[in-house]
Amino acid sequence: MKKDNKKVIYWLLIGCILIFIMVIVGGITRLTHSGLSITNYKLISGTIPPLNEVEWQEAFDLYKQYPEYQKLNTHFTLQDFKDIYFWEWLHRVLGRFIGLVFILPFLYFLLTKQLTKSTIKKSIILLCLGGFQGFLGWYMVKSGLIDRPDVSHYRLAAHLTTAFITFAFTFWVALDLMFPKKKEINRKFRNLIRVGLLVLLVQIIYGAFVAGLDAGFIHNFWPMMSEGQFMHETVYIEKNPFIKNFFEGKSGVQFVHRILAYVVVFFVFITWKKSRKLRVTTFQSKGVNLLLIFVALQFLLGVLTILLQVPVWLGVAHQVGAFLLLASYTFTLHRFSK
């Protein structure tokens, strides 16, 4: 049987789609403030939600013992609790399902000798990334169950960014199998794409900071942060020492996220402009064009998210936009790297 065949490619692409769905559900979970509804972590039995009113009441009583209920949601009824429980439960079940989708086919392909040594090594890295992602999810939730009714924005950023990186690497491995032929590369242009991708990853981290600190609910103006102010004064006086403003201050984090949006657009535009002067293949041209389309879409979604004060549907759309932009950057880098 041929190694690294179409079935292996389909497996990897299905994994990409599932991670994409997982990120969407994770975004909804965050935006609906559902992430701390399940306060005990049960790897196997946790896949089954409460099945009757007694079990629901037990779960609700457990939720009442933690800061989110005691400091924010004392007004919650059992029905309110059920609403937020659903999204966190779905998010966790999807995580377990994705784990099975990666592990079981990998073992099958491994035992039937359908993977090359290179793909085996890459697949093991994928499995490690997936396991680390699950750990970070638990580690993130834990930060909101001690003395504060919210998770650490640093841990949220680590959890979200790892999901994006896991997707990008899975997609890259699939592309390796889809386009096995080598070709000449323009190193300077490839390095430009690499730098742009790195800036995008930093922007994704700051997007998670904005989400974790609920920083999108302030300074709901554009292009100014407030009337007549490109940089609001709270950007540099909210935290002490000064540098903390840009990592832990709501205004400072939003300001950095705004500035990085312009930087990402700049890199994409320069990449597109320079590609016009190169001899490119059809797939290379499509990759660069997709970059331009998705960065424009993402920028527009970001502006609307700020102006409309982060409605759930728009916040999720903005996160999807980041995902599509990362996918197009990954595809473009791959097409100019081999």
Image (tube, rainbow, N blue to C red):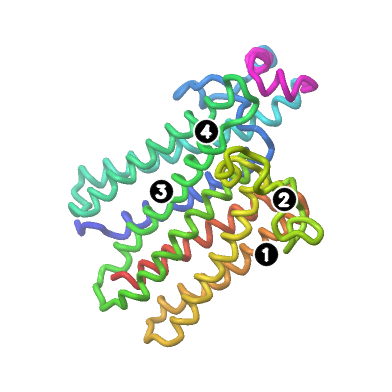
Residue under pointer 2: 233
Q: CA distance from mark 4 to mark 2?
A: 40 Å
Q: Position of residue 60 (x, y in %)?
A: 67, 17
- Which of marks 3 and 4 precedes in the sequence? 4
Return the mark for residue 321. Answer: none
In terms of depth relative to the viewer, which is nearer, 41 or 147?
147
- From the image, tell me which residue sits under label 1: 300
Q: Secondary structure at mark 3?
A: helix
Span highlighted in magenta in the image: 57-77
**Disc 2 to disc 1, how far (Cα)?**
25 Å
**Viewed as shown, does residue 272 lie left or right of 79?**
left
Disc nearer the start of the sequence (2/1): 2
Residue 92 badge: 4
Label 2 to label 3: alpha-carbon separation: 38 Å
Circle 1 Cα neighbour tier, 10 Å, few/some/many (<14 / 14–19 / ≥20): few
Q: Is residue 203 above or below residue 243?
A: below
* Residue 25 visible in rendering: no
What residue do we see at 72% from left, 53% from top? 232
Give the amino acid type for the residue marked by disc 4 in the picture: Arg
Q: Rounded to the nearest whole Å, what is the CA distance between mark 1 and mark 4? A: 31 Å
Tag 3 residue: 166
Quadrant in which the N terminus is drawn: bottom left
Residue type at tag 1: Leu
* For discs 2 and 3, the disc positioned in front in the rendered view: 2
Left or right of 23 on screen, residue 76? right
- Cβ–Cβ below 8 Å for labels 4 and 3? no
